Amino acid sequence: MKETGKPIRRQLSVNPEGVVPHLRDFPLLVVIRDDVLKSTEKGGHVLSEDGSDIHFLSGEGDALAYRIESYCPEDGALRARVRVPSLSADTTLYLCYGAGAVSCPDPVWDSHYALVQCNGDAIRSEPLDRVEALTVEAWVQSDRVNTDAFQVLVSRWSLRSTMDAFESCDAGETDGLDTKGYFGAVSDGRYVYFAPQCNASQERHGQVLRYDSRGGFNEPESWQGYDAGCTDGLNTKGYYGVVHAGDHIYFVPRTDGVTLHSRILRYDRRGEFRDPGSWEAYDVGRTMACQSAAYDGRYIYLSPGYEGDSGETGKALRYDTRGGFKDPDSYVIFDAGNTDGLDSKNYDGATFDGRFVYYSPLNERGIVLRHDTRAGFDDPVAWQALDASVHGLGMCVGAVFDGRYVYYVPYAHSNAVRYDTRGDFKDPEAWEAYDAAGTSGLHTKGYDGAAFDGQYVYYIPFYEGDEPQRGFHCRVLRYNTCMNFSDRAAWDAADGGVFTYPPNPGGFNGGAFDGRYVYFAPWREDPDENDDREYTPHGKVLRYDTADDASFILKYAECGHNGGLCASLPGPTFTIDTEDGTRSVRANRTLAPGRHHLAGVYDGERVTLYIDGAAVASTEASGHVQSGHTPVSVGRLAGGGAPFQGEIGEVRISTSARSDGWIDATQQNLANPMAFVRLGPEEETG
């Protein structure tokens, strides 16, 4: 053993694999466990029990800024940060110990870091004012497969406590088309797509409406219409629900006005919206109506509605997005209409909790149905049904998942019901009901779909159910998921039409959420006195701004089945709000259980999302990032919603745009610090 009290150094060399040259002032994580790093009292060579003699030098012998995060004299375990002036593949530095205590007054983190947290402890926190560039990073671990649970990692983003930010746009004559009467909508992060169902001129139609969220809501240039009603020579009209899956937008078939049909329509997002070559259709060959769908990242599950002349059906259709769109082998039908001996037929909307698909019952019997996606689709054991009418469940249209509970949306009545996914499906204690009638002094009855912003569930207003041709309304009902479901204070309502001019008539069928705004899909309104038509469709889209004070938000996952009649899996997302508007990028895939590094970078021209060191999505953006007054929140929204269901090891926020190389090196360093830095033998220097 070497004598104690003599200075010792050991060379540290950076693993050359993939490190971009000259990363300036890089905060290198050094993690070492070695017997010689035990204290001298424990048989090692570190002089002090607290490790105060440990320090770092550059390859040239200059003192480096460092911070000892932890040191264990019993087993020689060291965790430290070292500020490396210029990190490259050939960088060397020295770990020194064995002499007297050394002070380190210089900060490890460069001046661009506004916030640093390690294992919940704030290491650095500076004001975040109106910045021109931004990098938000999180090093996290999650062992849960909860792919559609809204989960926030880092945010400076607060939600409105009062519903008062509605605006309306009449898109009913977009591009010279009769763009009215839509059943559901979905957002792909930039565009919102509305599913064509029934308009004034054609009755059932195929005129797809699309809104570009980069443009002003009431600017005609932001809206596009395309008549897809004769795609691939098929009668592609009358759809119910929209699915965003990878590069495609799928429209769920219902009826063409003459017969029920199974002609699935899809749009390739890589092509021009109004180019017929971007569209294709396939007829599954069944005279049956599906009513929206769910998506688990591979399969699209179409909800069973009606079939031919037989009425209600339990025949559920599944499409494998990895197969050929026009390959019959990509489609499977299973009749779940007698699951558990119940009359489990006629469903309207579906949602996904990461394992189970929940079908929302339009049947008057309150028979809920779910499918276990980990088992075979055509295996009866994979299906469960329950008579939930005993829990107060009536007819529903759509459901939404908040990360724990599934909320069933009351159709033409006011009884809201939810199921706790942590409980057994057939356990009465897992079900809860609340009569929302009269909330905020309004006639809150009859909803069609729901949206979720991380804290609030918004029930989308449709029809009161008292008169066949009247009672279509615009009274949005909202529940605060951070409060008790049965607490009346957790519920509020607002008539969205009161805030718009002309007043929006309501009568919506589902909607969409783009990370900030809820979009309500226009279907029908109360007719004028002299209007004797069976339906009075309209194209007045309502939008609600959920954000009160927005700057940025980095999410591990965002709820994709968000609107009640739509499906997608956005996965990780990064959203910023600048002077020029809100911009968002998302992975459109979920993450496997384990450790991950997520980062969002804005450089004044583009906003980019990184996962595990690689850029996965990028879009144009401009303007200063809004500063606002909301403090930074880690692991949840400022109001307590959307908690991350895992552990956050580290958070960094920089007022600069970190480079691709910086992000990649950070991920490698955090993922395997022992491999990132190699440790050489001891050398006595005294």
Image (cartoon, rainbow, N blue to C red):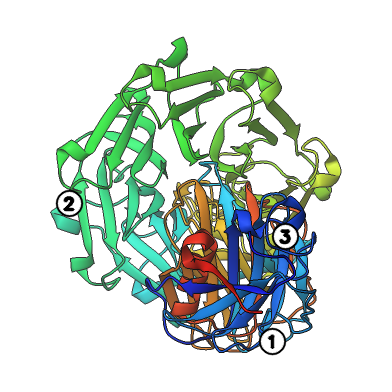
The mark that comes first in sequence, 2 or 1, is: 1
For badge 3, the amino acid type reads: Ser
Image check: 325 left or right of 436?
left
Q: Label 3, on which residue?
A: 70
Classify the position of the C terminus by image quarter. Answer: bottom right
Q: In front: 61, or 296? A: 61
The quadrant where residue 486 appears: top right
Q: Nearer the viewer, residue 587 or 223?
A: 587
Question: How packed is label 3: few (under 14 Cα within 10 Å), some, or many (20 or more)?
Answer: few
Which residue is tagged 1?
Answer: 111
Three-letter residue code for mark 2: Leu
- Residue 4 x, y percent position in the rendering: 72, 65
Q: Earlier in the sequence, mark 1 or mark 3?
A: 3
Residue most extreme to the top: 341
Percent x, y of residue 323: 21, 45
Q: CA distance from mark 2 to mark 1?
A: 62 Å
The local secondary structure at tag 1 comes to: loop
Residue 111 can be seen in this image? yes
Distance of mark 2 from mark 3, alpha carbons? 67 Å
SS of the residue under disc 3: strand
- Residue at 56%, 23% in the rendered image: 366
Q: Position of residue 258 (x, y in %)?
A: 27, 41
Near-viewer residue (611 or 617): 611
Residue 234: mark in rendering: 2
